[in-house]
Image (cartoon, rainbow, N blue to C red):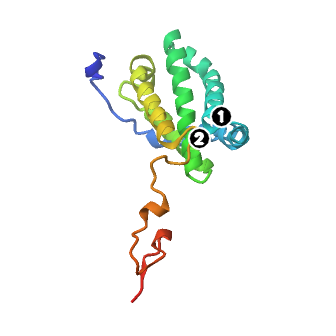
């Protein structure tokens, strides 16, 4: 935070109630993700590319959070840029995680709960994070989402672009039996 000229909180005591916060956020995330991930994501991905589905769901997610952002006093700029950017980036990462964990609804819920818990125990309180340092956190999440889209591709967010194909991993040793399928059984 010092690098960008923001004040650094002088006192930070992670709340002893952090496990309780996580449990509360877990149930709240389960409610949200029941709709976003459990109900809407698969049909949207069947109709659109994973990135397009993530963008649409992310925009809906952003609008859903506008009342809470307004209630804590976020500026219009942070609501529009930060809130929308965060919701869309967060949804891209959630769809990526969901697609790469065998469509695990549980993984999406844990990811959601961990991010909410982290924001709540941020030094200086959640409102400090939201009002002062949100742009940094939101920016890092957005950069991560861009990297994920670049590396895994917008179509499914599940096929790592730079993975080596099975044929390129084959050792090409004449005595090797089927090493390209992960079984390096050599003739004796």
Quarter of the figure that contains the C terminus:
bottom left
Q: Of discs 2 and 1, which sits in the foreground? A: 1
Which image quarter is the N terminus in?
top left
Q: Nearer the viewer, residue 18 or 175?
A: 175
Q: Is residue 166 visible?
A: yes
Side of 98 relative to 39 (left or right) = left
Identify the element where label 1 is drawn. Answer: helix
Cα distance between the residues tagged 2 and 1: 9 Å
In the figure, residue 135 lies in which quadrant? Answer: top left
For the residue carrying disc 2, how many other residues have a C-alpha within 10 Å: few (<14), some (14-19), or many (20+)?
many
- Position in image of residue 118 (x %, y %): 43, 35
- Give the image quarter of residue 42: top right
Residue closest to the eye, 182 or 97: 182
Residue 110's x, y, as percent? 53, 45
Q: Position of residue 86 (x, y in %)?
A: 51, 26
Which residue is at a point 27% across and 23% down the rendered structure image? 10
Label 1: few (<14), some (14–19) or many (≥20) C-alpha neighbours in 10 Å: many
Query: Which residue shows up at 62% across the image and 18% down it?
Result: 67
Q: Residue at x 47, y 29 (%)?
A: 142
Q: State if disc 1 and disc 2 touch (CB < 8 Å).
A: yes
Look at 54% across and 15% down and name the residue there.
Answer: 80
Q: What residue sits right under mark 1 in the picture? A: 53
Q: Residue lying furthest top in this view?
A: 76
At mark 2, the secondary structure is helix
Q: Position of residue 18 (x, y in %)?
A: 44, 39
Q: Is 43 left, or right, of 49 in this rendering?
A: right
User: In this view of the protein, which residue sits in the foreground, 167 or 152?
Assistant: 167
Q: Which residue is outermost to the bottom? A: 188
User: Mark number for residue 95?
Assistant: 2
The numbered mark, 2 or 1, whose residue comes first in the sequence reads 1
Q: Is residue 120 visible?
A: no
């Amino acid at each position: 935070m010092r690098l960008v000229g923001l004040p650094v909180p002088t006192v930070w005591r992670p709340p002893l109630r952090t496990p309780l916060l996580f449990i509360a956020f877990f149930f709240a995330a389960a409610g949200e993700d029941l709709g976003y991930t459990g109900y809407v994501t698969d049909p949207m991905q069947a109709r659109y590319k994973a990135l397009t589905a993530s963008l649409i769901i992310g925009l809906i997610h952003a609008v859903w959070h506008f009342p809470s952002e307004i209630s804590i006093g976020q500026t219009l700029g942070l609501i529009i840029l930060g809130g929308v950017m965060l919701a869309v980036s967060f949804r891209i990462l959630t769809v990526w995680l969901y697609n790469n964990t065998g469509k695990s609804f549980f993984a999406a819920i844990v990811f959601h709960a961990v991010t909410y818990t982290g924001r709540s125990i941020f030094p200086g309180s959640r409102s400090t994070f939201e009002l002062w340092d949100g742009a940094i956190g939101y920016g890092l999440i957005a950069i991560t989402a861009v990297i994920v889209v670049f590396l895994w591709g917008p179509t499914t967010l599940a096929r790592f672009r730079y993975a080596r194909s099975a044929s390129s991993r084959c050792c090409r040793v004449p005595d090797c039996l089927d090493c390209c399928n992960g079984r390096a059984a050599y003739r004796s």
